[in-house]
Amino acid sequence: MPETYLPTVLDNRRLTETVHALRLQSAELARAARPGQFVHIKCGEGNLLRRPVSICRAEDGVLTVVLEVRGEGTRWLSQRRAGDMLDVLGPLGRGFDLSHKNIIVVGGGIGVPPMLFAARAAGAKAAVLGFRSRENAILAEEFRDVCEAVYITTDDGSLGEHGTVAGPLERLLREGGCSAVLACGPRPMLQAAAALAETYKVPCQVSLEERMGCGVGACLVCACKTVVDGKEKMRRVCKDGPVFPAEEVVW
Amino acid sequence: MPETYLPTVLDNRRLTETVHALRLQSAELARAARPGQFVHIKCGEGNLLRRPVSICRAEDGVLTVVLEVRGEGTRWLSQRRAGDMLDVLGPLGRGFDLSHKNIIVVGGGIGVPPMLFAARAAGAKAAVLGFRSRENAILAEEFRDVCEAVYITTDDGSLGEHGTVAGPLERLLREGGCSAVLACGPRPMLQAAAALAETYKVPCQVSLEERMGCGVGACLVCACKTVVDGKEKMRRVCKDGPVFPAEEVVW
Amino acid sequence: MTADLSLIFAGVKFKTPVVVASGTFGFGREYGEYFDLNDLGGICVKGLTVKERPGNPPPRIAETPMGILNSVGLQNPGVDAFISGELPNLRRFDTNIIANISGNTVEEYCEMAEKLSSAKVDLIEVNISCPNVKAGGLAFGTSCQSAALVTREVKKHAAVPVMVKLSPNVTDIAEIARAVEEAGADALSLINTLLGMRLNIETFRPVLRNNTGGLSGPAVFPVALRMVWQVANAVSIPILGMGGISTGADAVEMLIAGADMVSVGTALFADPYAPLSVTRGIKAFMERKNIKSVTDLTGRILPY
Amino acid sequence: MTADLSLIFAGVKFKTPVVVASGTFGFGREYGEYFDLNDLGGICVKGLTVKERPGNPPPRIAETPMGILNSVGLQNPGVDAFISGELPNLRRFDTNIIANISGNTVEEYCEMAEKLSSAKVDLIEVNISCPNVKAGGLAFGTSCQSAALVTREVKKHAAVPVMVKLSPNVTDIAEIARAVEEAGADALSLINTLLGMRLNIETFRPVLRNNTGGLSGPAVFPVALRMVWQVANAVSIPILGMGGISTGADAVEMLIAGADMVSVGTALFADPYAPLSVTRGIKAFMERKNIKSVTDLTGRILPY
Ligand SMILES: Cc1cc2nc3c(=O)[nH]c(=O)nc-3n(C[C@H](O)[C@H](O)[C@H](O)COP(=O)(O)OP(=O)(O)OC[C@H]3O[C@@H](n4cnc5c(N)ncnc54)[C@H](O)[C@@H]3O)c2cc1C
Ligand SMILES: Cc1cc2nc3c(=O)[nH]c(=O)nc-3n(C[C@H](O)[C@H](O)[C@H](O)COP(=O)(O)OP(=O)(O)OC[C@H]3O[C@@H](n4cnc5c(N)ncnc54)[C@H](O)[C@@H]3O)c2cc1C
Ligand SMILES: Cc1cc2nc3c(=O)[nH]c(=O)nc-3n(C[C@H](O)[C@H](O)[C@H](O)COP(=O)(O)O)c2cc1C
Ligand SMILES: Cc1cc2nc3c(=O)[nH]c(=O)nc-3n(C[C@H](O)[C@H](O)[C@H](O)COP(=O)(O)O)c2cc1C
Ligand code: FES
Ligand code: FES
């Protein structure tokens, strides 16, 4: 059941210049969390709205989130220290359908963390991770621990393959033997992954982002356009998603 | 010169259930402070306006303020810990005129702290301090260190004399030999002190309170009605006061 | 002493004076996972239109200092789908259901009022103040004539009490309140959102895809309180006050200013339990002040 | 690249587009102790009236979520005392002096405009939007007719450019802006404060002795921004935008929305140096974005 919890920060580890991993102590959150779900975190008194952050790991009573400083809210979060208490609503949303064998997970930038949770839970066949540059790469070791193969690409070629995730993903799909693509990252990346998966007739699930109000499905501000049974339908990223079958998304 | 400073909290000592003494490290503030002046303190991101708080002591690079929890702002202040930084504008306002011999200082409730600064600076002859009850009494020892005599009254008689400051003050004035009364506290107390001083033809100065905006004299929200040269005049508690000659105040 | 929070509002009995605001609570299903809907005085459901509406394109929300802007644009399944698909579920709870309606024409308002009366909602809230749609909405709410016209016609078609929701984007809200009262409204609710805007300075684009949106949340509370006071002085029908209420103390202020009941909206987004803590806060205040009935709080203001 | 912050506004040269808002800066003496007044684009002085006014009784201020309510009620020494006692001091600085005037009658506005023109202030700001006084003020600002009338008459008596300050407490601010432009105004400033209220629930009393007051500060920023955008789309005379600006980013938003200059008011109370940091913030933004002249920022919004 989603609920409001007041977990304590166990530690705050800086992964890159702007990305922090926070481990939160909460048996309930860790137990209830599913890959692809997110939590909605209150970021200080100054900010009225909570901030949605994906769950990166949930184990042994500890929930890990990885966040990039983008504005005031994420800056406030990045400054939390061990012992601080957070106000967290969650876990929220519909996560990934992991009832597939031989899953490829695809993550781009700050879309990488939730894919670790999915990869771990699914025992993914391969992970394809895209970053801007070597300095922005995160969690590569963790993926190597849980995936059979990990492919890294960078926009500037400073780490792994030069280019986008599309390269390794296409090769993997061409090789065959994979039965689902799961992706989170910037919209163009999701669109490219979905297009490739379609070409190779592999089902694809994408995790979308949208600005949120309530986070629980009541206010309808996080709408995204989808097609269900040939009919256009506005659905809620927070409640019907954030994960959607790629073929339902109107890009 | 008044300025904005970012002093560090040296310690936060709880004096009663709701009253805290904060010592702030700031050579500049301590050097510039005069008895009767106040500082304007930012109380967290949630509160737009600063809060005016009188200076209780200023010595050796340390400024002491004593505050009572009344609402959100003072609650926030009361929760500051050693090492925290405050945003303080000051010292502000016109303080007491101490160019008198044999001064009697009168304080009531949370109006007591600024009188300690005045008593210490003036080497006051006597202090008359009024509290609701024994539990609310503060700073009595400190006054004994700097005044020849200290009289305490409580509304319920649980400490010192039963009644208000008017009792001891009238006796002291009747005895004679005092040349000025300086007072800070609730309005009815100030009015009573002023009336007694007038009866005994002793000049009296009172420190007023009003809700403030800028704190520096620019916005005119802290107006109080005074009479100067027989003419009514709105004056600014923050800049023309908080200390006014009692005979100029329109009660 | 146990404070009595119940009251009769526009002829309808409410267990508590705390309802949830239209558009912030969907049709009750989502927050129903968090607390017992039986604990609410009432539920104003998401704004309904004659036909299904997809609403405006996203982004539909922007944050502002102690407020939010929304431009949902009345996304809803249409009045018929509400009656068949949502109302039966809501009816399982012992709380009042207030149907919020927005029409493109006076006829549309009337059509919905008829259908919802037959479906036996407890109250109809006539929204003439939505700032996020082109036709209808705000246009009806900014002149006395059109506000009165909608009210009069809806009253002819409604078999349940009619409450009219006023816009704060007007020069004189009391004047409109009086016009609506004269036209036969059973109650008033206010305020809807204040029209506002935010820009992204990196892209020079509005944050909202709709350019502008409606401001709600604590930032608007002092404006809402002033308007409730002005309207309470102008009319004698009951008032549902809202706009930025997030604590019991806020609600008490609103009641004292002249509201008979209060709505909690945006506060839900920070705290899903806000309507319950607001209710508890009102009760605690009454007991501390020895006020027996919540009706004794309404309009208790002592103006200078 | 060094960004050029200077501009011509209503025919007057300004060093920077940042001025301080009327009523928040007195006559410059107090904040002049904190920073060099030469660093300001201009100073809008405290609202002036023909005769000295004591203002409203205190309390005159209340805090609200990210905002304040004030009910000063135009306390000022009168226009003559300003000209003889304050203007000479202000004239020592290389910054523009904008005289803000409020009349009980059209004649009073004209009388002040004449005197201040002779005294050679740089601009006259006609306040038809003060919510804190009974006569004059807001009454003139809520109808097109009266707003246009005041503007037309003041223009006949003013020998310096005339800027009219609009009220946000209206249904359609663009309509009033157009009326004032047609009546000959050289510029517009907006917004004045939104009428609001707070209560003390312990005493059932309004916090302000005047019952209501004017809301300013960050809470009103999204409303101010929307109004500046609407007015910029409606008129071609320059706009001084204000309402809740406290950072360089806020000011940039306001300029992009269509303001030619911005005012900083309430932000001073939290930070006396706010006008300087706002100026620096605009400059840094322009340099980062490679925008040469601040006039290239104005109205650069890309609406959907
Ligand atoms: C389902 C979901 C999962 C996410 N998971 C992560 C994650 O694991 N790690 C991470 O670093 N970020 C994640 N994000 C993005 C993160 O929510 C935003 O970066 C964050 O809200 C920005 O807040 P701010 O105050 O720092 O920025 P500001 O720009 O100051 O925020 C202003 C407002 O816009 C909203 N907003 C701004 N950017 C976004 C965005 N990209 N998505 C949604 N709302 C936004 C904010 O929530 C806030 O309401 C996720 C977003 C969604 C929708
Ligand atoms: C010159 C001066 C000196 C003061 N010295 C002291 C002192 O040494 N110790 C101390 O404990 N208190 C002092 N006070 C009172 C103190 O400023 C208020 O108790 C405090 O501002 C309350 O803020 P709050 O947020 O806790 O209360 P809230 O009631 O939540 O405050 C709401 C608003 O009202 C204002 N306000 C409320 N009460 C007062 C008040 N009595 N005076 C002025 N503004 C008020 C606040 O500043 C704030 O803007 C002094 C006041 C003045 C004017
Ligand atoms: C996301 C959102 C959607 C809303 N939708 C509606 C609506 O459909 N009909 C309506 O009358 N008011 C709608 N409102 C306005 C609220 O009902 C309420 O009048 C306003 O938000 C002020 O109250 P608050 O500050 O407590 O939220 C909406 C408000 C929000 C925030
Ligand atoms: C204390 C105070 C006094 C004011 N007095 C005046 C005034 O005399 N004349 C006027 O035109 N506006 C007056 N205003 C309004 C401001 O000039 C400005 O329009 C408004 O505060 C919005 O800007 P801000 O949010 O930056 O303060 C006053 C505002 C405040 C807060
Ligand atoms: S954020 Fe409210 S419905 Fe998704
Ligand atoms: S608080 Fe602004 S003049 Fe005193």
Image (spheres, coloured by chain):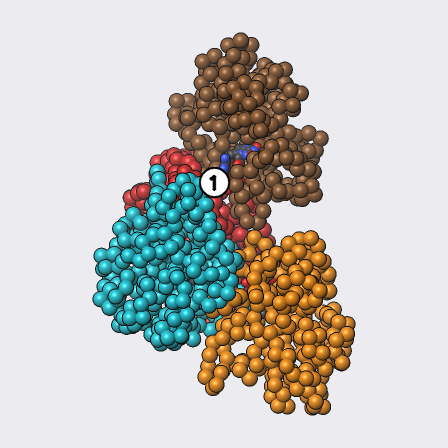
Chain colours: A brown, B orange, C red, D cyan
Relative to B152, say whether B66 is above or below: above
Across and down, in percent, residue A197 comes to 48, 16
- Quadrant for the N terminus of chain A in the image: top right
Q: Is D304 or B157 nearer to us in this picture?
A: D304
Q: Is C227 or D113 nearer to us in this picture?
A: D113
Across and down, in percent, residue C268 comes to 53, 45
Q: Is A161 or D53 nearer to us in this picture?
A: A161
- Quadrant for the C terminus of chain A in the image: top left
Residue drawn at the location 31% of the way across and 49% of the way down:
D232
Crowd rating for badge 1 (residues with CA inside 10 Å; few <14, some 14–19, many 20+) = many
Residue drawn at the location 59% of the way across and 14% of the way down:
A102
- The residue singled out by tag 1 in the image is A219
Q: Say which quarter of the image contains residue A115.
A: top right
Q: Is mark 1 within 8 Å of ligand 5?
A: yes
Q: Secondary structure at mark 1?
A: loop
Residue drawn at the location 75% of the way across and 71% of the way down:
B142
Mark 1 — on which chain does it sit? A
Position of residue A127 in the picture relative to residue B234 (left or right): right
Across and down, in percent, residue A59 comes to 68, 29
| Disc 1 residue type (three-letter) | Cys
* Residue C290 in view in this figure: no
Across and down, in percent, residue A93 comes to 55, 32
Relative to C130, say whether A134 is above or below: above
* Residue D210 in view in this figure: yes
Q: Say which quarter of the image contains residue A73.
A: top right
Q: Is A113 or A247 nearer to us in this picture?
A: A113
Residue drawn at the location 57% of the way across and 68% of the way down:
B92
